[in-house]
Amino acid sequence: MKIALIQCDIAFGDPEKNYLHVEKKIDQAMGANPDVIILPELWTTGYDLARLGKIADSEAGRTRQFAGQLAGKYQVTIISGSVAKLTPQGTTNTLLVFNRQGECIKEYSKAHLFRLMNEDKYLKAGDEDGLFSIDGIPAAGFICYDIRFPEWIRKHVLAGARMLFIPAEWPKPRLDHWRTLLIARAIENQAFVIACNRSGSDPDNVFAGHSIVISPWGKVLTEAGEEETILQADLDLSSIDAVRSHIPVFEDRRPELY
């Protein structure tokens, strides 16, 4: 399975500019004929949280039309990062997945809100799982801070997920945490980890970039630097079963103890 990760800068609080930029990036990414494209977290607005009442995507309607149309046009699965979804109940940080026909097959709203960036003040936490399938292969989506909660990730892997997709806006000062946590999630779950971070900065943060793809053995297959780029990876999905057979972690679990 061929994956393209669009690591891009995000214009702070400027959805119009971001939709145009991402459309160009998706067009560029299709030059390598990927099966899946993934975008970063909150790519339509960035962390302009105080203005979400004005700039968030109402019911994610514009993003549904935008990403669905491109997924159908190119016949590619698009994991449309996450967007600020405005609803009558509040605004969520929501990941959307579109299949090759342009249909939205999954919404997942970030379950763990990051207080250090004031998410708890402006966003409503989700309470549904992130499970979906890509061309029949079970997968799961998480968002940024979620990777610090291994029990949440493991729940999805026990439900069948074999690929873990993570859009993020992870700051540069904690780059070491980003890499270490993602490698650990791959090793302990014996699953592919595909994590797409943003590049650039906003008024309060400099972001790490370093989008990354990690094998079920914990090997870094490819990794970006800090600048805008389109990262490519080709996943050998048969390696998942090989790793799980070699070290049968799931057979050796003792859930009666924990």
Image (cartoon, rainbow, N blue to C red):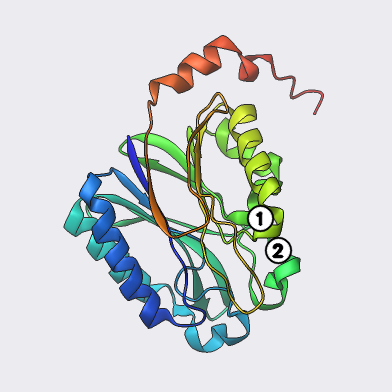
244 or 212: nearer the viewer? 212
The residue type indicated by label 1 comes to Tyr
Q: Residue at x 61, y 13 (%)?
A: 247
Q: Residue under circle 1?
A: 145
Q: Residue at x 65, y 59 (%)?
A: 172
- The reply, left or right, for residue 30 in relation to residue 166 is left
Asked where in the image residue 203 lies, by quadrant, the reply is: bottom right
Pointer 2 or 1: first along the chain = 2
Q: Residue at x 63, y 73 (%)?
A: 123
Q: Which quadrant of the rendered structure holds the C terminus?
A: top right
Is 113 rendered above or below residue 220?
below
In this view, which residue lies farthest toward the top? 246
- The reply, left or right, for residue 65 in relation to residue 142 is left
Q: Is residue 99 visible?
A: no
Does the CB distance between marks 2 and 1 fall below 8 Å?
A: yes
Q: Is residue 222 visible?
A: yes
What label does residue 114 carry, if any? 2
Q: Residue at x 68, y 63 (%)?
A: 113
> How many C-alpha atoms fall within 10 Å of the one at disc 2: few (<14), some, or many (≥20)?
some
The residue type indicated by label 2 comes to Phe
In this view, which residue lies farthest toward the right? 257
- The reply, left or right, for residue 185 in relation to residue 165 is right
- The reply, left or right, for residue 243 in relation to residue 100 is right
